Image: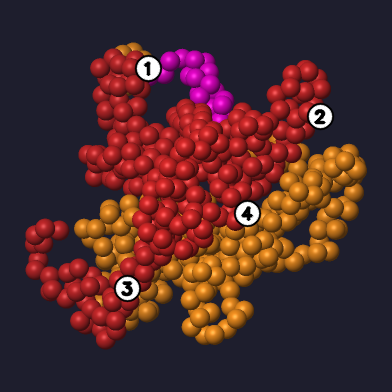
Amino acid sequence: MASPAVPIPASRSVGGRARAGVDRYGRLVETWLRGHTLLVYLFLYLPIVVVVVFSFNGTQRRVTNWDGFSLRWYQVVLADKAIQGYLLNSVIVGTATAVISTIFGTMAALGLQRTPRWFRAPFDALTYVSIIIPELVIALASLVFFASTIGPEGVVTNLTGVKLGFGFHTIVSALALFNISLVMLLVRARMSGMDRTHVEASYDLYGTPWRTFWQITFPQLLPAIIAGFLLSFTFAFDDYLITTFVNGQGTSTMPLFVFGQIRRGVTPATNAVAAIMLLVTLSVLLLGQFLTRRRGATGRDTSVAGMIAEQGA
Amino acid sequence: MAAAVGDRARPVEPGRWRGRLLTGALMLPATLWYLVLLVAPIAIVLVFSFGNRTRIGGYSPGFSFDNYANAIRSPDPFLTSLFLSVVGTALCLLVGLPLAYFIATRATKRKALLIVLLVIPFWTSFLIRTYAWLLILGPEGLAGFIKDLTGSTSFRILGTEPGVLIGLLYGYLPLMIFPLYVTLERMDRALVEASKDLGAGRWATFRQVTLPIALPGLITGSILVFIPMMGEYVIPQLLGYGQVYTVGNLLYSRFLEARNWPSGSALAMILIVIMLAVVTVYVWLTNRGRTVRNVSVV
């Protein structure tokens, strides 16, 4: 595209924008597209800015009364033993879900290409269902399922006498359903764009499947695996619905605490807690972007953001 | 010859059985998860939906359609959810399509940046971003401002359907934009040029060239936002104060507050059937008369 062999008239070279002079409403449409885009981005960022700004509010009383810049609510919140506990629980849930989802999701992505058709079709269907089904349905179905199996009156409890009950294990396994599918789709998308020549070359050089995998395939899949890990951490860390349905004694997480606060009436401290949650989720994304920012030789955007955007396909 | 050498030299196929065993082992955890934590729970919900509630809030086996009959007798929450999801999906499309179009066709150098800027809000805490709208739209925010401006005493945004719709649009917009962007990005720009060279106007080109190309992304995006919106709980609860009473609110209260699981299970099954029906009809309508390749849901 840098030097076209045939000179192209300026009005046609870059499509819409250059053509704007040609048709009557062109300029108007271009201006509208730009304005619309700008407005949407403002719309997307407004809430984030509002929460962060109000978290520095020094007010003693009402949340929306601005009373000078202050870090006091951060101090209050971070010194709160209960909030520390919720934060820790959220990190535990996020990490455990991310580890399980990443390992099992990646395994499934690797295995799936070698499964027979009779297996793959229903498996794919379940993958899509698990991604798209409203979280509330998964939450209530998980509650009913756990209650009737490992709950106090559950079948498993009655048969074995083992009292598993509700806790981190129920939260994490219910959350992992969606996240295993998510990781699998990310890794599969990466595999479909992968260059097979290196794998072939490795086999030609007598590389064993095991070594070929770790030295050739795995490094190529790594950006997708990292993206999957961090994304599932974020979703689990931030989850409200499933967690509120299947949590147990002492396993309340940050989102549950925030939701309770909102229901009882927000305080200036709520904003500081909210800003901390924004910070945690945002730093996870930035970490991912940093770890995966190198572009592959194919020119495809291998960064976390690029891969998520491409998931739409 | 190459094949003969290859077969002997390369340890590619580690024997039929070992290969199968490995594949099976790789697939086992995910398959287990789907069966135990997706198929089985929904099967149990289905069984519960025909059962009875015991006095202490438990489940006693039975087979009757009473729970379904009761659910259908008060369809308001379903209608509210359906209304919100249809309008919400339309809003996402109206706002998302021009944006996706702009990023895919106009933003040349800044494309990557614009995408990252879309992913950031999508990735940051959904609960907190929804909470922020409480502050923005509340009586001391936008609603108060409009109230002062117009002198109306009863004006409010929170607790109304428009308030919930703003939250839905905000929460689900990226899920609509990503698939639209991907399809538009892959579009061959020469087709647009050809259409214009043949004398088609802007609008005609958009309708007859761009839109059909974007259709798979449009369908994917619509399904991706419509279905979760049908079961949304957090947004109507926070921004609708629970006064915009959706299926989500109803299910939440049946399971966690009223603890009437059989009744809640019937409601959940009806919700699932509605979602399946709407998606089927939608895909059928948009595909009618066209051969659209590769319409995958995700």
Which residue in the protein does label 1 denote?
A: A210
Q: Residue at x 20, y 68 (%)?
A: A14
Type of amino acid at the residue the image marks with label 1: Trp
Q: Specify the colour of chain B.
A: orange
Disc nearest the viewer among 1 and 3: 3
Residue B45: in sight, yes or no? yes
First along the sequence among labels 1 and 4 = 1
Q: Residues within 10 Å of mark 3 (few under 14, many from 20)?
A: few
**Which mark is drawn over residue A263?**
4
Chain in red, by letter, is A
- Membership of B113 in magenta stretch: no
Q: Nearer the viewer, mark 2 or mark 1?
A: 2
The mark lying in front, picked from 2 and 4, is 4
The location of residue B297, given as percent across then percent down, is: 52, 51
Tag 1, which chain? A
Residue B131, image x, y percentages:
52, 56
Quick check: do tags 2 and 4 share a chain?
A: yes
